Image (cartoon, rainbow, N blue to C red):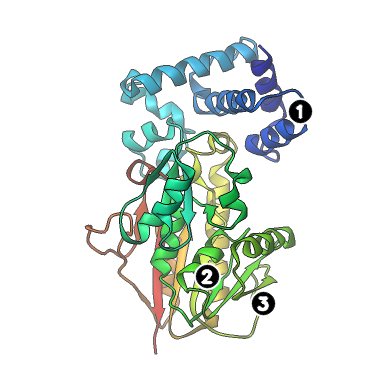
Amino acid sequence: MMRLDFAAGVIAKADREHPADTVLRERLRAATGISREDGRAVSEAVFAYYRWLEWLTTNVPIQERISKALELERAFRANPASIPDNELKYAVPRWVPDHVAVSPEWLRTLQQAPKLWLRARPGKGRELAERLGDCWSGGEGLVADAIAYLGAEDLFRSEEFHAGQFELQDISSQAVGWVCDPQPGETWWDACAGEGGKTLHLGDLMKGKGLIWASDRAEWRLQKLKRRAARAGMFNYRSALWDGGAKRPTKGTFNGILVDAPCSGIGTWQRNPHARWTTSVEDVKELGALQKELLANAIPALKPGGRLVYSVCTLAREETTEVAEFVTRTVPGLKRLALKNPLQPDAEAADSVWIWPQAADGNGMFICAWQKAG
């Protein structure tokens, strides 16, 4: 009962301004007398509640609803067919099918627990997997450094993490770096760097040679990047605030620009089920307009022949194809590039890379790119 009460307390505090995963993390950190096993059980209960929210009756105590969600979760894990296709529509808000290419395969994947992906340093994937144990390697070549961790240890406490041997980074996020394909000696701008996961990946792919500018509108995120870069031993970068406006963080120009733009995060709904119920169609439309503005303000910093890569962890048309078509139609001198999906190397190149959770065992992601004339 203690676990159910704790989970109920988290759910009671969670709302649009206070995401459930943040509330959960803060309350577990502040709690006393809770074992790691209890913490995992509470986390599972909170996330199950939001996955199965639309299957739950509302006229019973919250603890009973959480217990029912856990029951549905166990039944689904034992037999995914226990939920018929015609019921899967309850996994997402009713507005979603008008804006996302919904399929039973995607909805069924949303109801599964996500994998935890690590990014090893270049060429060290297999070695890292052997050291950590309970790991599964993503494949051959570059993808071999993408490791799915299947164990239950707190990796933030591991010797390998503190030695900078890996970063926690979803495989779809890693695919963005592989599409960028930055070369040693080039100059790149990670325009919406956040806490720097993709900045660090670009640095590794450039073998520490060349220069990366990382910018974000929040200083605290750039401070986290600074700490992560120090742990990883990455020094070929500069960071600066950028609010997304016409005044860029540096007057320099770049061989490549990555705009991993703020988005509705629909592609992360498997990992973050609470966000399904706090994201609105108005968010999708507003973010689509913001993404166009960010791209327009970043494009002038491209060198002739330079590449612009646009990525978002969402699947809504207003934030993906409509943004890409707007840029292609309105910005002269940019050529849309054909891209290979690094997670499906045998597939033909296309004008966009769509990564769906059911195909990648990771977040949903949209990626496209252009090259500047000259």
The CA span between labels 1 and 2 is 38 Å
- Left or right of residue 267, residue 282 in this image: right
The location of residue 352, given as percent across then percent down, is 34, 62
Residue under label 1: 31
Q: Nearer the viewer, mark 1 or mark 3?
A: 1
Q: Are marks 1 and 2 in contact (CB under 8 Å)?
A: no
Please state if 221 lies on the left or on the right of 114 as rendered: right
Gap in angstroms between the C-alphas marked 1 and 3: 41 Å
Residue 335 falls left or right of residue 152: left
Q: What residue type is labelled 3?
A: Pro
Which disc is residue 203 wearing?
2
Residue 350: quadrant of the picture: bottom left
In the displayed structure, would residue 323 be above or below residue 266? below
Quadrant in the picture for the C terminus? bottom left
Residue 365 location (% of width, % of height): 43, 53
Element marked by disc 1: loop
Residue appearing at x 34%, y 18% in the figure: 82
Disc 3 designates what residue? 249
Q: Which residue is at 52% across, 66% downward?
A: 259
Specify the amino acid type for callout 1: Ala
Circle 2 Cα neighbour tier, 10 Å, few/some/many (<14 / 14–19 / ≥20): many
Question: Quick one: SS at disc 2?
Answer: helix
